[in-house]
Image (tube, rainbow, N blue to C red):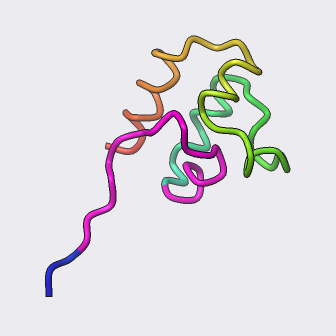
Amino acid sequence: MPTLQRPTEIDVDESVDAIMRRWPQTIRVFLEFRMKCVGCPIATFHSIRDSYLEHRVDLDRFVAALQSAIT
């Protein structure tokens, strides 16, 4: 039976909660960027794109840091 591989690329339209659940090592990235997403009830509704706008961080730098954490 073939094994299913999980995607290894951050999708900016995926919810913050889903990203942190799939790759718990990304939690430290949110904290390093001083984002208050960890434990936030809105994390299940906010995408990565929403949260970078909300917290005014550089999207490219943030996604690169998330990507680095999961690879």
Please, which residue is most extreme toward the left here? 1
Total number of numbered discs in the rendering: 0
| Residue in the foreground of this view, choosing between 24 and 57 | 57
Residue 14, horizontal then vertical, whole percent = 55, 44
- Side (left or right) of 59 relative to 71: right
| Quadrant holding the N terminus | bottom left
- Up the image or down, 33 lies above or below 9; here it is above
Residue 24 sits above or below residue 61 on the image: below
Front in this rendered view, residue 15 or 23: 15
Residue 20: percent from left, percent from top: 59, 51
Q: Residue at x 58, y 59 (%)?
A: 21
Q: Residue at x 66, y 51 (%)?
A: 17
In the image, what residue occupies the spot 51% across and 48% down?
Answer: 25
In this view of the protein, which residue sits in the foreground, 49 or 27? Answer: 49
**Horizontal arrangement in the rendering, residue 25 relative to residue 32 (left or right):** left
Quarter assignment of residue 67: top left
Q: Which residues fall within the magenta stretch? A: 4-22
Left or right side of 26 for 2? left
